[in-house]
Image: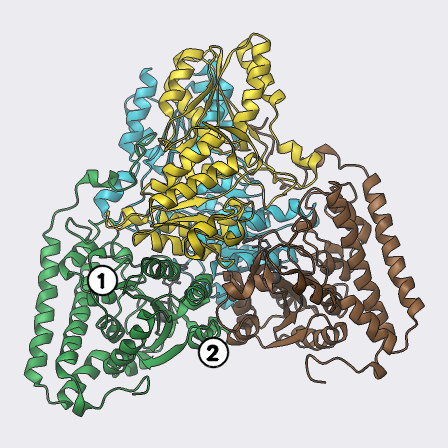
Chain colours: A cyan, B yellow, C brown, D green
Amino acid sequence: MAVMTYIDASRQAVAEEMRRDPMVWAVGEDLGRGGVFGQYKGLVDEFGPDRISDAPISESCIMGAAVGAAMTGTRPIVEMRFSDFALCAVDELVNQAAKARYMFGGQTRVPLVVREPIGMWRSSAAQHSQSLEAWYAHIPGLVVAVPSTPADNRALLKAAIRCDDPVVFMEHKNLWALGGDVPDGDDVAEFGKARAVREGKDLTIVSWSAAVHTATEAATTLAGEGIEAEVLDLRTLWPWDKDAVLASVERTGRLLVVQEAVSVAGFGAEVAATVAENLHPALKAPVKRLGAPRIPISYAPVLEDQVRITADAIAAAARGLVKT
Amino acid sequence: MAVMTYIDASRQAVAEEMRRDPMVWAVGEDLGRGGVFGQYKGLVDEFGPDRISDAPISESCIMGAAVGAAMTGTRPIVEMRFSDFALCAVDELVNQAAKARYMFGGQTRVPLVVREPIGMWRSSAAQHSQSLEAWYAHIPGLVVAVPSTPADNRALLKAAIRCDDPVVFMEHKNLWALGGDVPDGDDVAEFGKARAVREGKDLTIVSWSAAVHTATEAATTLAGEGIEAEVLDLRTLWPWDKDAVLASVERTGRLLVVQEAVSVAGFGAEVAATVAENLHPALKAPVKRLGAPRIPISYAPVLEDQVRITADAIAAAARGLVKT
Amino acid sequence: MPAGQSSSASNLDRERYVARFREMCRIREFETAAIAASNEKLVLGAIHPSIGQEAVAAGVCGNLRRDDIILSTHRGHGHTMAKGADALAMMRELFGRAGGTSQGKGGSMHIADFSVGMLGANGVVAANINIAAGAAHAIKLKGEDKVVVCFFGDGAINRGPFLEGLNWAGVFKLPILFVCEDNGFAATTRTKAMTSGDGPAARADSIGIKSETVDGNDIAAVDEIASELIDEARRGTPRFLVARTYRLTGHTSSDPAPYRPADEVKERWLNDPIENCRQMLLTAGVDESELSAIAEAAAKEMKDAYETAKASDWPEKDLAYVDVQDIGDPRGGAF
Amino acid sequence: MPAGQSSSASNLDRERYVARFREMCRIREFETAAIAASNEKLVLGAIHPSIGQEAVAAGVCGNLRRDDIILSTHRGHGHTMAKGADALAMMRELFGRAGGTSQGKGGSMHIADFSVGMLGANGVVAANINIAAGAAHAIKLKGEDKVVVCFFGDGAINRGPFLEGLNWAGVFKLPILFVCEDNGFAATTRTKAMTSGDGPAARADSIGIKSETVDGNDIAAVDEIASELIDEARRGTPRFLVARTYRLTGHTSSDPAPYRPADEVKERWLNDPIENCRQMLLTAGVDESELSAIAEAAAKEMKDAYETAKASDWPEKDLAYVDVQDIGDPRGGAF
Ligand SMILES: Cc1ncc(C[n+]2csc(CCOP(=O)(O)OP(=O)(O)O)c2C)c(N)n1
Ligand SMILES: Cc1ncc(C[n+]2csc(CCOP(=O)(O)OP(=O)(O)O)c2C)c(N)n1
Ligand SMILES: [Mg+2]
Ligand SMILES: [Mg+2]
């Protein structure tokens, strides 16, 4: 067990997988100098510029070329810099990467990892702050990973690199500096397994990515008031751990979904709808979602905060549910 | 009242709005010869090639240029041909069109209509059949219209053209030839108002676009068995008529959402979650969604049919709910 | 020999061009059968015939090895067949039947045969360009002795991937040949009307991908320049070929193409690449009867393919749930 | 006068260039103040200084009318100010305060002032190119006597919109001038390393948009060629200008730019466009004291703007819910 930051954990995952498999390579703008957040720092020294490859500002070609290179035996890791810029490469991801294996009748596979840092982070404003994980969960053929801890970032990224299908890998920008325990050795995550951050009998809080930490903070507050919240971190949205969520809510009788993304048509709706469909009789209170209002993200901190979920809001919602 | 096809109704809407407002113009590939489905047939004769404008195969520029032209006083109608090709222009729609008004603090508006024909239609396969309306409902700043009848196609398209914000206008390819009554005169729809296709006391079926017709067919079958289904056609997904849906389900106690799109993270999740959140005590049965499996759409009819919702499946689900 | 000029008849490699002639006839007959099937509603999705453009497919692909790679467009039957795909499997694919190249999942617009290095037609114009660049990138990374050929139309040069993919190939010095089939049209639109500047060759040159232009209806000319450019590309110099040709049919098999004058089409039929090839071979002394026999064999082969495809089974229903991805249950929440 | 050569000092229009000098000083001082504020965490989002590139902004925008239009990039302070935006409102925007050009909603990367025809910086490289083409399209549709100038960097020429937007402008003959500020870098990358071919000018020419190249650190040269090209563009011939310059700071205010040798930067500082302009004016007989006074006034103006911005109110919270769109309740389902 080592203590490591979220960003270092990701760097270690990439380095280890690149050592393990010479077909793994990474490509994106500025990677030779470490990438925009330093995720690739130093890697070019070990692996050289062919495997830690710079790219022109051409998101569409970075993604499209990776599809071609993935179909022909290599395992590209694609760096999109900000998930917002991946919107310049949606055809390549959704019409091409996600569909190739199926559309060609299983003749090929697209083992591709698309790293798309998401989320709000120090006044980055409308075009550098989005969380669009729900989009990719909706697309057949894609895996969607949303790690919230250094350990998961390492283990999920390793799993993503070994996955034979395209994985949208969404790291949260506000977590880069977060430290935490990371298991030694070849810790590779299994997709579709939620992590119980905290156990509790009164309600189930389901969350993912950075919001997990806010939810956990709220759960601690609630515990002080005698309300025991179980906090589940989904870790991947496709596949997502329906079994764990249903089992937990069956026990607690109450569901609160907490997400940073816009609530309307966000992935929280999928979780809430699934629970409502399956556990109606067991529910002691209506399912409930918390998410961002349907507004773009502002630059000014005071306005940006309007889109930012707080532990207080979560605790308040939880109290409301438990009272019911 | 005239009887008219869905496609003719749309053509009439465009023609009438172009007569009304000289700032309205349409741009897309092949429009001068009527567009790929003939939606623009003959319009170039009346309005000339500047206002019914051909375009290079450049979805990204068609959309991006329309954003610029919309910010500067014109009202472009953008033709994307297939909604799948709009995936080549997502930055322009989501990062630019949807955010400009807000991000620039209200200094501008983007009165833009993006026509994106959706849906399955005679073996069009994985890259020409998608229904991604849920994506756009998730994006602050966008209006999403999904007409199911000729009358609505005309009235909603007129409303879209008059709207000062960007509207994603999704016509269903399988409805082009559908005939129906269309009111005379300047019939302009109000966004966010559902249409009650059928009244009923036993359950509420919520649907939109082509699936409305399948749902209605199922409701007719059910009526023969003594089950009275209320069928609501949402017509727009943002805004969506939460009030009408909640009022109906409050009466019937049962909700079935029927969509052509992939069920996972589809808009049906939003409807089901909202109903579950708000009407838990009034529900006589769990909310239920029907949607496509999470698989790409195949070419071979027998495989394509695996993704196609049927009236039988809807009726069966409805029976299941009513029995509860 | 300078680019774009064909061998004189006298020193023609007859065997080579008889083979090309056969390939072109096979493509023509395949598409003729497919169009008939489409008219009879046996083929349901749109098909985009390449009738009139066969010399490009045959001339370019004839210079490739089996493990070389091609990527194609919506108008991809010719390229696929010329790369070595089985005509019956292709026909079954168009019919949406079991035994199709993609088990009936893709159809005409996504025709592919990875076993012969054909990595797919594409339903999105120009999308194949970036993918092709990536396939070439992988060849370079792996140090393989292969080359990629990427076909696209003149309409594709106005989409972003044209710029991005060519730039990529130039920056990374990839083994790739871009082939732009300039048939003058993008669907119902004369491509020139929507294209600024001097067109594909000038654009490619400006991105540092040296271009050649060839008469795409002259099989010998295409064959020779393709051979040269493929050699160069294989050695890591990306190259670009513009093949001027004409789409003798409508954009799809159901497009009567009223947007172009009948005279224009009639005149263009006089420059049919297959007939051109036949004349060249006759001039070179090949027997008329040999050529007729080849043409008839091609017709019979495709007629048989049509009949066999028609009699083939539909795919198993459950195949719909196969090859989505390794994990996750695709049925959750569905009907 | 041929493109790219500046007037000799003797017949220099002094008033004109004193005005340009003032504008350049103002831009420099604005950004210097903004960098300081960023270091003090008063400006929170990233800022991309254009220090060293001021002559391009001043030289081009000085030739525009108030109702002409510009679009800019992440590095947009200079363009915005040169187009006439109020420095204090801009500073407030960077501070995220009430009274900002966009009420604090956009910040530096989305700086905009529609009242002076500045239609926005953009956080997405090259995205402004298509939008600019559309703004020019609207001018043509409405028959207005206006022109659009679209600024972008040398890194932007590798994204699809460069091709699509230029082609669009050429096809529709739009009143637009594209200005590529070639500062040699795209973030930490030497742009040349990721660019195939001869660069922006060659590419533009190949798309039928005739280009000129100018020394972007020579205000008179920029001013003269811009004046000429803007006239042509206004008459419906889209044009292209490459301005060679250098980014004297890091990519953002927090980038120490270790990826380039100190010597290179040092040498480039000797070619500071503001100092170049000062020397030109001195040679032309303008008083040193006049120029110093201008520089000091600019420094004071921006220091004041900084102080006033710092003392300004935050925006009202509820503004977060304003200007999303006319219909639909944005609060539904939210926390
Ligand atoms: C991105 C995209 N836009 C539009 C279309 C519709 N479309 C299919 S083929 C075609 C014309 C293509 O012209 P060209 O590239 O010259 O190829 P050709 O059909 O002439 O072989 C168009 C516009 C598409 N498939 N993809
Ligand atoms: C589509 C997109 N990709 C990547 C980025 C990140 N990024 C911001 S500025 C920049 C470099 C731009 O270089 P250039 O166009 O030369 O402009 P300069 O910064 O030199 O002014 C990059 C890569 C972005 N904003 N948008
Ligand atoms: Mg063509
Ligand atoms: Mg630059």
Q: Residue at x 54, y 41 (%)?
A: A139
* Residue D232 visible in the picture: yes
Kind of residue at disc 1: Asp
- Look at mark 1 in the image and give the residue it sits on: D67
Q: Residue at x 79, y 66 (%)?
A: C274
For the residue labelled by badge 2, is the local secondary structure a helix, a strand or a loop?
Answer: loop
In this image, C202 relative to A323: left or right?
Answer: right
Residue C118: image location, x then y, percent:
71, 58
Residue B320: image location, x then y, percent:
57, 14
| Res D92 quadrant in image | bottom left
Q: Nearer the viewer, residue A116 or D284?
A: D284
In this image, B324 relative to D220: left or right?
Answer: right
| Res D69 quadrant in image | bottom left
For the residue labelled by badge 1, is the local secondary structure a helix, a strand or a loop?
Answer: loop
* Ligand 4 sits in quadrant: bottom left
In this image, C262 relative to A279: left or right?
Answer: right
Q: Nearer the viewer, residue D15 or B254?
A: D15
In this image, A38 relative to C273: left or right?
Answer: left
Neighbours of disc 1 within 10 Å: few (<14), some (14-19), many (20+)? some
Q: Residue at x 39, y 62 (%)?
A: D126
| Res D254 quadrant in image | bottom left
Q: Nearer the viewer, residue B57 or B242?
A: B57
Residue B40: image location, x then y, percent:
49, 46
- Look at mark 2 in the image and give the residue it sits on: D198
Query: On screen, D106 above or below A284?
Result: below
Task: Please report whichever mark, 1 or 2, sits nearer to the chain's N-terminal start.
Answer: 1
Residue D162: image location, x then y, percent:
43, 65
Ligand 2: does it lie within 8 Å of the C-beta at label 1? Answer: no
